[in-house]
Structure formats: structure tokens, C-alpha cells
Amino acid sequence: MIRQYVEDFGRELGDQAPKSSVTRATNLMQEAGVSLGLFIGALQDAKKTTQKRSGNIQKPGPAGLAQKNKMAYFFSVLEDQLGLRETATTGADEARDDRSPGHRGA
């Protein structure tokens, strides 16, 4: 079931590695520990978000094709929706927490 969705979305989003994308999606579902229904909903939402923001995607499609490769962005959105993606500020917040009060750095 996941394979069908990812392959269909991949055709629309310029996927260059459909087998790897199916494996990645399956692994994300397992890592997130969500039901199939919830995961399919997240896939659909990630696709909508990717299409809505596709003007910002810079990676071109394979040589000779005008279509952009949007799959990397799609998976980033999917990871965000599943709560699997750490934000860039998380690391900075942790570093700040490790400092003693009043520490101003060198």
C-alpha cells in the first residue's frame, strides 16, 4: 500500500530513485510508530505542502527534463509531520543549556 502511494507521488514529484523512496517511506512509518491510515494521511499532506511550495525548490530534475526533483523536500516535510525531524534550534538550545549561568564564552 505504501509502495503505491510513494511511486505515484514520486512520478509527480520527479523522483529519481523510486525503490529507495519506498524503503525510506516504510522506514519512516516504522520509526514514527504510526498506523497505516495516519501515515497515508501524512504522505498526502506532505505531497500537498511540497506542491504548494515547489517554487522554492532548487534541485533540477535529471538531465534533459524540466521537472524539478521535489522528493528530498517531500521527505523533509514528511519527517516534520511525523515529528522525526530535529529543528536547527534544538542543537543551539541544548548548547545553551550546557553553559553555566553568566558564561559569556571566550
Image (tube, helix red, strand yellow):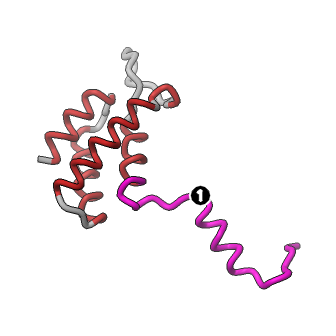
Q: In which quarter of the image is the C terminus?
A: bottom right
**Mark 1 burial class by Cα count in 10 Å: few <14, some 14-19, many 20+:** few
Q: Where is residue 47 in the image (x, y as percent from the top left)?
A: 32, 37
Q: Where is residue 24 in the image (x, y as percent from the top left)?
A: 28, 52
Q: Residue at x 14, y 40 (%)?
A: 4
Q: Where is residue 82 in the image (x, y as percent from the top left)?
A: 35, 58
Q: Which residue lies furthest to the bottom in this view?
A: 100
Query: What residue range appears in magenta?
Result: 80-106
Q: Which residue is drawn at 29% across and 65% down?
A: 31
Is-magenta flag for residue 33?
no
Q: In this view, does 21 lie to the left or right of 84?
A: left
Is-magenta flag for residue 98?
yes
Q: What residue type is labelled 1?
A: Ala
Q: Element under label 1? A: helix
Q: Residue at x 80, y 83 (%)?
A: 101
Q: Say if 81 sits above or below 94 in the image.
A: above
Q: Say if 81 sits above or below 66 in the image.
A: below
Depth check: 23 or 35 in front? Answer: 35
Q: Position of residue 1 (x, y in %)?
A: 11, 47
- Residue topped by disc 1: 88
